[in-house]
Amino acid sequence: MILATGGHAMTGVCKKCGGKMLVYRTGPHPWRTGYEVQRSECADCKAQAARTTASDRKAR
């Protein structure tokens, strides 16, 4: 999946039920330059999570 921001969506595993987490929103981090916040939701139980990642997808 490619997001409107041009980045590639990352998927993960839900910590609550083990289902697939799908990114539904990506935006700039409020105070960390070069990072963004990805918000995701479980396809099965609808649990939500957020994580911070580098905007250029490189490990820092």
Image (cartoon, rainbow, N blue to C red):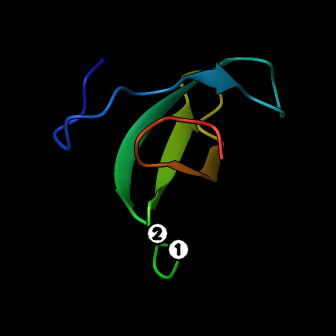
Amino acid identity at mark 1: Arg
In x, y percent, where is residue 36? 45, 57
Position of residue 38 measured from the top left corner of the image (x, y, whole percent): 49, 49
Q: Residue at x 38, y 40 (%)?
A: 24
Per the rendering, the mark at residue 32 is 1
Residue 53 picture location, percent across and down: 56, 48
43 horizontally vs 28: left or right = right
Q: Which mark is residue 47?
A: none
The residue singled out by tag 2 in the image is 29
What is the CA distance from the residue labelled 2 to the residue labelled 1?
Answer: 6 Å
Check disc 2 and give the amino acid type. Answer: His
Q: Residue at x 50, y 82 (%)?
A: 31
Residues tagged 2 and 1 counted as in contact (Cβ below 8 A)? yes
Q: Say which quadrant the N terminus sits in.
A: top left
Q: Residue 14 is drawn in which quadrant?
A: top right
Residue at position x 36%, y 48% in the image: 25
Q: Quadrant of residue 3?
A: top left
User: Foreground residue, 33 or 40?
Assistant: 33
Q: Is residue 38 left or right of residue 47?
A: left
Residue 58 vs residue 9, the one in the foreground: 58
Residue 48 in the image: above or below residue 13: below
